[in-house]
Amino acid sequence: MKSLSKILTITLLYILTLNVSTFAMITEEVDVAVVGGGLAGLTAAVNLHEKGVKHSLYEAKETLGGRTYSVTTAEGTVFNMGGEWIDSDHKRMHALAQKLGLDLQKETYANPVLVALGGDTISMDDKIQLFESIVEKLKRVIKGMKQSPLDYYQAGTEVPYSRYKSLADILPGDLTEDERRTIEAYVEGSDGASTSDLQAPLIVSLKKDIKEFLDLFKYKQAETPQDQIDSVAFQHRVAGGMSTMIGALRDRLDGGNVHIGHRLTRIFKDTAERFHLIFDDGGEGREVIAKSVVMTIPFSVLRSITLDTTLALPKLCLDAINTLTYGTNAKIQIPLKEEEELTPFQYFVHGATKTLSWNPVSGKGLTIFMGGDTGKTLSEATAPPLAQSVLKQLGGTGGVREGLQIKNWSADPFAKGSYSTAGVNQSPKLGTPSNTHKGVRKFAEPVGGLVFAGEHTSLDYAAYMEGAVRSGELGAELAAQHLL
């Protein structure tokens, strides 16, 4: 009896270690499994649906949209909690909105960009002088980088990532306090991290962005007819908020092929080159067997999922999964009372809190955007005083604010960050372009039917919704090709 018991025990343990489903687990087979129901995943699923490819989409949360969704208050104010802005060159986002029959509202600069670094907001002349000085000082550093790049950027696989110089390390030493505050507020908002946590070469894009603001200030100062200024749309937003676009994408899919509440825990490949995806669905679990996979989960989350060695992921891909940096951006959404009026503005750079602010998609309110430590630590306790500081500068009323909504993307277990950025502790090779797929980072090249998608995989549009859509479209195309 002891021998029989021992044999049964060993047999049971062996079965449990096999790459096969347990008897209780639901099993299904599809041609393509799309993992992640954010903008990239939904775009991929819609494109696969239009191609007639048998597929299913699996989302860990109970809602779709990922890092792109909006909320509407009882008074009708619409706030985007994540992705929001669509630039003029974001052609695939413009095309997607048109395809879905959605309106894009123009965001012009009829109202001013306000800058307050310590006290009151500064004048247009002072803004021009401030930004001109910053641009000239950044130019000097960039010229030095081109002459002696290794002094600023220690390339080479033998150098630990922690030894690369940061953006803070190479900022001009003669920056004034106001200039430094301006840079820090802008960088923490746009890149989601402090200058000490970002790679030195980002100084090039920083100079470009500051120069664009400077050009805008000069354009506004010039004797240009107001109606001409008002007609220029520098950016767009989806009318009604991003949940409108998410819903329109969802409506194009077969409801039976969309599975919410499915959290991926493991993925491996069998000897027949089929992918096995193990999901926690809150019940017995689900195993999906697929010929191809479009993986849209942000790497900040993917790194906690078991990726079996049978996937044969290249070293660069694994390096990206384990080290790609994500920003700590967060938002405070403030509904305003009907009678409450703020100083008119398009954007507000607040140096004291290192935040950027703008108006909601529609209705009365204020969005406060931040990154770095401020974003990472944003909570129900820290939000009210920060909101009061910004509102006071804009002429808002004091007192306790009701109806504040906050979104800390770093604290969201399904995101673990806002969007990808160039962190100082990640390899510079993660920015290497693919030799085989235009507009894709090399680390995101397909691996035997496993296709990576998401804003983080885009070479030119990382951190933008444009990158998510482009990668979703390409991901569907590559997955379909793998089936041939």
Image: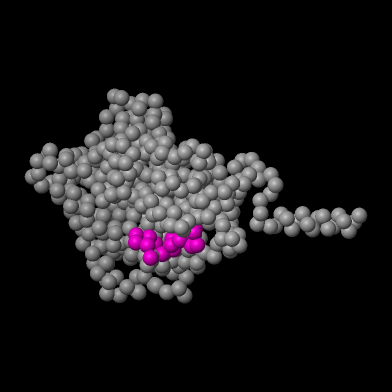
Q: Is 249 inside the magenta-drawn segment?
A: no
Between residues 42 and 221, which one lies in front from this camera angle?
A: 42
Dividing the picture into quadrants, the one containing residue 227 is top left
Please name the residue shown 12% across and 39% down the image. Answer: 226
Q: Is residue 364 above or below residue 446?
A: above
Instruction: Report the number of discs.
Output: 0
x and y, in percent, of residue 236 in the image: 27, 42
> Along the horizontal axis of the image, is 87 left or right of 12?
left
Outermost residue, right side: 1
Q: Position of residue 127 (x, y in %)?
A: 20, 49
Q: Colour scheme of this structure image?
A: one colour
- Most common SS among magenta residues: loop
Q: Is residue 31 visible?
A: yes
Residue 315, given in percent of the width and then of the height, sits at: 50, 67
Q: Quadrant of the N terminus?
A: bottom right
Residue nearer the viewer, 454 or 397: 454
Any part of residue 319 in sight: no
Identity of the residue drawn at 47% across and 75% down: 158
The one nearer the camera, 191 or 278, is: 278
Looking at the image, is 359 positioned above or below residue 152?
above
What residue is drawn where x is 77% and y is 54%? 12
Residue plotted at (37% across, 49% down): 469
Compared to residue 271, the image places residue 45 above or below, namely: above
Residue 446 belongs to the span the image colors magenta: yes
In the picture, measured across the screen, residue 376 lies left or right of residue 264, that is: left
Residue 377 against residue 248 in the figure, above or below: below
Q: Which residues are magenta?
A: 436-456
